Image: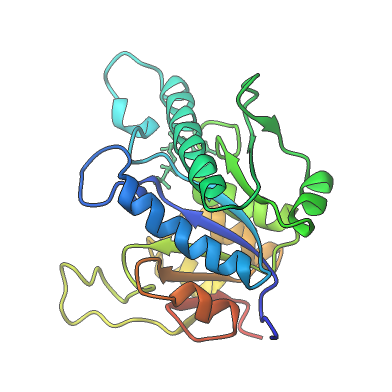
Amino acid sequence: MTLKYKRILLKFSGEALMGDGDFGLEAKTLHRVVGQVKELHDLGVEIGIVVGGGNIFRGAQIQGSGIARTTGDHMGMMATVINALALRDVIESFGMKSQILSAMSIEGISSGFNANTVKKQLADGEVLVFAAGTGSPFFTTDTAAALRGIEIDADIVLKATKVDGIYTADPVKDLTATRYKSLTYNEVIQKNLQVMDMTAFVLCRDHNMPIRVFDMFKDNAVIRIVKGGDEGTLVSSGE
Ligand code: UDP
């Protein structure tokens, strides 16, 4: 079977893992997400995952509390490590080999990121979870996804959201909003579409890394994407 995308960088926000709750992790949701990862893996897709931490903590939320923003961001990055630990175990419980590679060194829990080694591990069928974002405050895990995607020579960055793509306006608030099938990087930047942060888009633009924004909970959407299907919204150079 021919795959359009052989190596992918999959980005989940922390919120994607919390199910119907408003904090933390839900086992049922974790299993659902990893079930999709398993299907990708069975197809022979090489999978690197960047996971967010917004279901636990975001640095910006402590503003004015006496905790410095950089400390808050360190806390946010630690939150991504908590999610990565859960993901790694569930991935292994589905019979896949997995490892956490963290941008912050946490001895005994994770290893560091080395793009050269990572490419070999991916080629060997390991599902790798990249934790702690970029390792630097003032960034987000969307930027980490763009960065890791470029570093591992992924064919595409797949950003899983609750909505099935990028819309002209927030489809929850505006019923007339319509979905873009495709956009160029510059269109996203000019229209200031708030689906990923601009640093991530600029990085992808400068390295010609396509991004597809899709709904992780739409059955088999991610499988259709790797086979070349037209799910969600594609952001690319347009060429
Ligand atoms: N964070 C950071 N640098 C990074 C990535 C993340 O400082 O490179 C911090 C930041 O405080 C952020 C939090 O970690 O709010 C959780 O990441 P993010 O908000 O991207 O998670 P998501 O919204 O995807 O769940």
Residue shown at the point (50%, 33%) measured from the top left: 81
Q: Quadrant of ligand 1?
A: top left
Residue shown at the point (39%, 45%) measured from the top left: 14
Q: Position of residue 82 (x, y in %)?
A: 45, 32
Q: Position of residue 39 (x, y in %)?
A: 54, 68
Residue shown at the point (66%, 81%) measured from the top left: 4
Quarter holding the N terminus? Answer: bottom right
Q: Nearer the viewer, residue 42 or 211?
A: 42
Q: Position of residue 12 (x, y in %)?
A: 45, 53
Residue 40, by quadrant, is bottom right
Task: State whether residue 164 is above or below residue 194.
Answer: below
Residue shown at the point (24%, 68%) measured from the top left: 170
Quarter holding the C terminus? Answer: bottom right
Task: State whether residue 152 is above or below residue 55.
Answer: below
Can I make out residue 140 in this image? no
Residue 178, by quadrant, is bottom left
Image-based side of 68 in relation to 44, left or right: left
Q: Position of residue 92 (x, y in %)?
A: 56, 46
